[in-house]
Image (tube, rainbow, N blue to C red):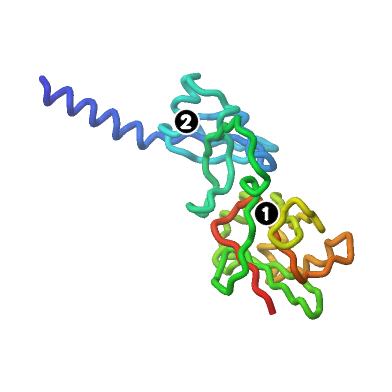
């Protein structure tokens, strides 16, 4: 009897892991609008296929849609379901923004800072530009950057946004064209909300 029960439990687990659910969400915000058992296209919404186990508590009403969102996962290099991390403690701006390091190491997102000509260019790695899933799922997203005083995100010089599709479909973008002021590139830092796994600034 015990062996039979174990077999049934094992079959139930294996079956549940094979079941797929389909999360409909707004691409611009990642907000979840519904979860379906079948893959259907709904105008205005993107669809993410997930294992039933990932959305089981949502479908049973144990958790709310507002506790989750869909976004690109820098580690997995794909769009995934994420749980909202709630932190009621006030955060310093340095904890909210990622300072892009000056390094020659290969990175997902690379700035090239030409100080002599005062030109700041931006490019994505070849692996990202060849990622068709990323291009399809995140094309309308924008990456936001802040140019600040050196090592001080509280002194803002420039703030600009780059459309991800433009970045992925071009070898390089001149982002100084987006500057609103005649900002000099010497002694500056660049901050962003970290979306990809690696970033770098190369100085020439």
Q: Residue furthest right?
A: 181
The x, y position of residue 123, in whole percent, is: 67, 68
Along the viewing direction, whichever of 48 and 29 lies nearer the viewer: 29
- Is 23 situated left or right of 115 in this image? left
Up the image or down, 128 lies above or below 14; here it is below
Circle 1: is it few (<14), some (14-19), or many (20+) Cα within 10 Å? some
Measure the alpha-carbon separation of dots 2 and 1: 30 Å
Say what secondary structure mark 2 lies in.
helix
Tell me where residue 65 appears, x and y as whole percent: 57, 27
Q: Is residue 9 above or below residue 195?
A: above
Q: Is residue 87 left or right of residue 27?
A: left
Give the quarter of the figure containing the N terminus. Answer: top left
Quick check: marks 2 and 1 in contact, CB under 8 Å? no
Q: Which residue is mark 2?
A: 55
Q: Residue at x 69, y 79 (%)?
A: 204
Which residue is painted at 60% across and 32% down in the image? 89
The residue closer to the viewer here, 62 or 151, is 151
Label 1 residue SS: strand
Residue that numbered label 1 is attached to: 192
């Amino acid at each position: 009897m015990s062996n039979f029960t174990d077999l049934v439990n094992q079959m139930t687990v294996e079956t549940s892991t094979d079941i797929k659910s389909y999360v409909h969400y707004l691409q611009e915000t990642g907000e979840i609008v519904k979860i379906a058992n079948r893959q259907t296209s709904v105008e205005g919404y993107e669809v993410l296929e997930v294992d039933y186990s990932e959305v089981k508590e949502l479908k049973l009403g144990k958790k709310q849609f507002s506790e989750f969102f869909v976004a690109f996962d820098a580690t997995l290099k794909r769009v995934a379901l994420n749980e909202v991390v709630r932190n009621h403690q006030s955060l310093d701006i340095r904890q909210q923004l990622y300072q892009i390091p000056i390094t020659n190491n290969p990175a997902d997102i690379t700035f090239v800072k030409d100080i002599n000509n005062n030109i700041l260019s931006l490019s994505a790695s070849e692996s990202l530009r060849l990622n068709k899933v990323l291009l399809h799922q995140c094309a309308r997203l924008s990456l936001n950057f802040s140019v600040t005083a050196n090592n001080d995100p509280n002194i803002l010089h420039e703030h600009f946004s780059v459309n991800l599709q433009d970045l992925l479909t071009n070898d390089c973008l001149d982002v100084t064209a987006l500057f609103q002021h005649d900002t000099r590139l010497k002694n500056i830092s660049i901050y962003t909300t970290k979306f990809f796994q690696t970033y770098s600034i190369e100085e020439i």
